[in-house]
Amino acid sequence: MIMKCVNELCSARSKLQSLGRMVGALLFLGLLTACAQNPVTGGRDFVMLSENQELEIGRQYHPQLVEQYGLYPDEALQAYVQELGERLAAASHRDHLVYRFTVLDSPVINAFALPGGYIYITRGLMAYLNSEAELAAVLGHEIGHVTARHGVRQASAAQAANLGYTIGAILVPELRAAPSQQLFNVLGGALLSGYGREHELEADRLGAEYLARTGYKPQAMIDVIGVLKDQATFAEAEAQKQGRDYQGYHGIFATHPDNDTRLQQVVLAANRYANLDNARVGREDYLRRIQGMVFGDSEAQGIRSGNKFFHRDMRFALTFPENWHIENNPDSLIAIAPGGHAVIQMGASDLNRRQTPAEFIEDRLKISRLQDGQVVRSNGLEGYTGLTTMQGRQVRVTVMYLRDKAFIFVGGARESRQFVEFDKDVLETARSLQELAPEQYHLARAHTIEVVTVGPDDTYEKWARESPITNSPESQLRLLNGDYPDGQLVPGTLAKRIRGGSE
């Protein structure tokens, strides 16, 4: 039996070696037939998609992205970003494409591009920019990704890595085993991970060139990186305090440490295209354009205010434990205890049958029996709660009915020994659910950006005391104005502060 296994192993190894040579030859032939001229460098790139296919990717996924994030409902702002983007694109290496620039209604700090000229920036990122030049730098960077065909090149590399595995899986059944698949995935992933750093740097180099050719200082690219680095530093510190993972912006500052020097070099090189004496900054014009822009949560997704949450469309209010971090996701609310020691997740689902909350748990959640199950009555609402085990951990499940919806709460502690300590917080959060009365609708209005002239007595400390921002308001106000971590307001200049929805 042992010799049989050894012989099979040797046979498989021989097949793999032969396969390796075959796959290598096939991939080499693919390389010869899939090389296309790089629009930027004029050199040859490995791509497996034609320009027509590239454009089709953008057409296909653009509606899905818009549906997922939503357009920011400000036609004037959308037109402003489109016009600025078109000027930058006209100076690019692929000026024959029709570019579309879209402001997404998302508080997330991000910008990205689809192949084919579809470019997106969130209102979340726009809130932290302080000039038209900085906005141009972000758009120029994303145009750089399109002109250098970064998305297509990555897709081609992924296809090549997948091709190697697919051929192998067909010819050698042993490759279909999970460990072999993982190996090929790792190799494919390593191939792709190397692209990220160089592509981001190339996009910054191209963006700086397009800035210069359009009348802006290339330095704006570095200014934007500074804005994003400050935001990342703040967000990472907040995440550490709350015991949760930090997911940063996708840009070049998140990669290897020597990028700062290389970034300075590529931006400096773009100065030869610039008229530095007459370069446009556009600070006042930009700030005027974002006056009144929504900051943070939108009314459609509900508003966080301290440890409270208000949703006008769904007409409910909720109170979480003090000092817990609240994440407002499209399909759920998640509250995380300080240090990450416990978590509560809440979602809502339509009611379709006339059944009790206990029956709903069994029928819809497929939990046949809860330990210590009991009826919950609070704020005129009825529900049911009890304990169960999920992935080896004890959790509390509570369902509360409000009109035609079931609000589902699931919560527990990271460590089993802490469950009793946090269980009361989980239950009290569910019990806090209540209907939002018409006279409370103002509590569910979005916060907005207010651009004001700084007065002689204005300070960040004073603005923080008056701010509706509940999480580190002083630091967030400094971030908004490019003064993080310890800059001060300058009387007579324009600055951004946040106006509460109920004001």
Image (spheres, rainbow, N blue to C red):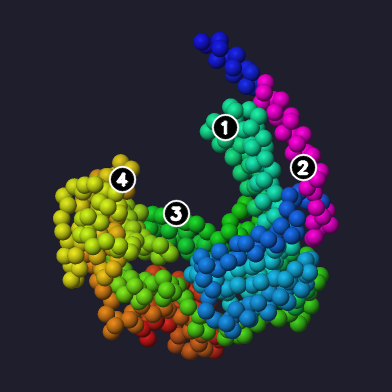
Which amino acid type is shown beneath numbered disc 3? Asp
Mark earlier in primary sequence (3, 2): 2
Left or right for 290, reference 94:
left
Residue at x 80%, y 71% (from the top left corner): 273
Mark earlier in primary sequence (1, 4): 1
Mark earlier in primary sequence (2, 4): 2
Is most of the magenta stretch helix, strand or loop?
helix
Categorize mark 2 by other alpha carbons within 10 Å: few (<14), some (14-19), many (20+): some
Front in this rendered view, residue 225 or 156 = 156
Q: Circle 4 — which element?
A: strand
Residue at x 28%, y 68% (from the top left corner): 404
Left or right for 333, reference 23:
left
Pointer 4 residue: 390
Closer to viewer: mark 3 or mark 2? 2
Q: CA–CA distance between discs 2 and 4? A: 48 Å
Query: Residues in magenta?
Result: 14-43
Above or below: residue 369 compared with residue 1: below
Closer to viewer: mark 3 or mark 1? 1
Q: CA–CA distance between discs 3 and 2? A: 40 Å
**For the residues bearing labels 1 and 4, Cβ distance under 8 angstroms:** no
Q: Circle 3 — which element?
A: loop
Pointer 3 residue: 245
Mark earlier in primary sequence (4, 3): 3
Residue 325, can we see it? no
Categorize mark 4 by other alpha carbons within 10 Å: few (<14), some (14-19), many (20+): few
Pointer 1 residue: 176
Q: CA–CA distance between discs 1 and 4? A: 31 Å
**For the residues bearing labels 3 and 1, Cβ distance under 8 angstroms:** no
Coordinates of residue 392 in the picture (x, y in percent):
30, 41
Which amino acid type is shown beneath numbered disc 2? Gly
